[in-house]
Image (tube, rainbow, N blue to C red):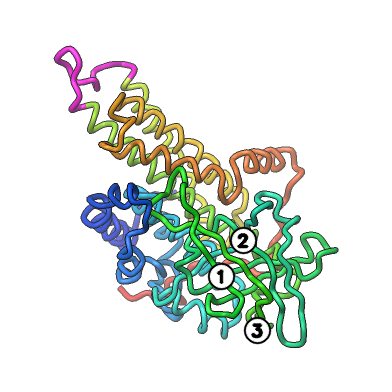
Amino acid sequence: MDFTLNSEQLAAQKMVRDYVAKEVIPTIGEWDRKQQMDPEILPRMAELGILGISIPTRYGGQGFDYITLGLVCEELERGDTTLRVVMSVHHGLNSMSLLQWGTEEQKQQFLTPQARGEKYAAFCLTEPGVGSDVVNMTSTARRVGDKYILNGEKMWISLATKAHHFLVVAKTNPEAGHRGMSAFIVTNDMPGVTSGDIHGKLGVRAGSTGWVAFQDVEVPVANRLGEEGEGFKVAMGSLDNGRYTVASGAIGLIRACLEESVKYAQERKTGGRPISDHQLIKQKIGYMQQWYEAGRLLYLKSGWLKNQGIRNTQETGLAKWYATDHSVQAALEAVQIHGAYGFSDEYPVERYLRNSKGAVIYEGTSEIHQLMQADYAFGFREDHPLRCELPAYNAEDWQRES
């Protein structure tokens, strides 16, 4: 096994790391306190090519592999979870699903402008009364001729008021359980589509989170993603991609906690000695180092599997579970190391703690992932190939330019 990053991966990593250090970290605390999204984030990410980093160049992307996507998400969340959330919904949950399931016409019409950053995208699965229990969603799409009439409301949707395109899952046959769900591409300018922001969140306050409602929205059959009844498969494939970005991003949050804690422990003195000399402080730092290295290996394995075109639901779920749980633990330890200062926004660790909590809830709670891994161990769960797998990475086919 070779864990060496190639020159393209290193170049992308450095570009995003420099962007975060120069343009995000100096101002993100201010936007977090305002509970507003910096209006420059999305255009700047588009300008840098991040929004289409691992989409083939023929569809407007940068043509990098999936490992590079993970590295980019790690660097973005090192700055703030807000930026990684953008990647999770725009790139992971939406654009990669279009790459996986879309027709050529859909890719040209919707994926290409998304990969170029000309249009922003979101993913609509969760509902006000339905989170993990996806099968009991109440949104419906009734076919009438060459259109579907879509009704329902989605909640906790990142980029709800920023997105131009929504990937929406609704029931086309309410009596058929998970086999009666279908996926659709809905645009924000379709009559009957409304959205709004949610305020008062614990974390990711510098991001955009909201609701999207659909009232008698006429969606062309041509906008259906996959076949009718394949919505559950589309959604689960989307979550494989989104969870990968969450896992790699959470590792960036662990790294942020580690780096800030090391810096503070070397500067803060008690009894004339830096607290880094104390054994209990070293213990906390040691744990964070362990969590970072182990979690990074888990997400890199998932990225490698994606590059090979191998189904990776189990591996990506494990990476997401481990990384997000330990990002919360790392943030708790970082606050503890900072003492009273960790309880104020003078230092970024209190923001890390608030931000860390969301990722153990969305895209599969830690409890759901724990049950999934147990089912794999018992042999109760087996991943069968989807009708349409995420395409394997091929540098020549993706037309990467050196």
Which numbered disc covers residue 154?
Answer: 2
Give the class, few, some or many, for how many residues have Cα within 10 Å of label 2's Cα (few <14, many ≥20). Answer: many
Query: Dot 1, crowdedness within 10 Å: few (<14), some or many (≥20)?
Result: some
Question: What secondary structure is marked by label 2?
Answer: strand
| Mark number, residue 194 | 1
Label 3: state its secondary structure. Answer: helix
Horizontal and vertical percent position of residue 13: 31, 57
Residue 112 visible, this orientation: yes
Q: Can you identify the residue that label 3 sits on?
A: 222
**Horizontal and vertical percent position of residue 186:** 59, 75
Report the mark closest to the observer, 1 or 3.
Answer: 1
Nearer the N terminus, badge 1 or badge 3? 1
- Quadrant of the image occupied by residue 374: top right
Residue type at mark 1: give it. Answer: Thr
Residue 372 badge: none
Inspect the magenta stretch and tell me whether residue 133 lies in it.
no
The residue sitting at 45% across, 74% down in the picture is 114
The residue positioned 68% from the left and 66% from the top of the image is: 152
- Looking at the image, residue 323 lies above or below residue 2: above
Q: Whole-Å distance between the Cαs marked 2 and 3?
A: 22 Å
- Quadrant in the picture for residue 379: top right
> The residue under label 3 is which amino acid type?
Ala
Residue occupying image coordinates x 59% and y 62%: 238
Q: Which residues are magenta?
A: 266-280
Q: Quadrant of the C terminus?
A: bottom left
Q: In front here: 189 or 342? A: 189
x then y, percent, for residue 140: 73, 68
Work out which residue is located at the far right of the displayed protein and give it: 175
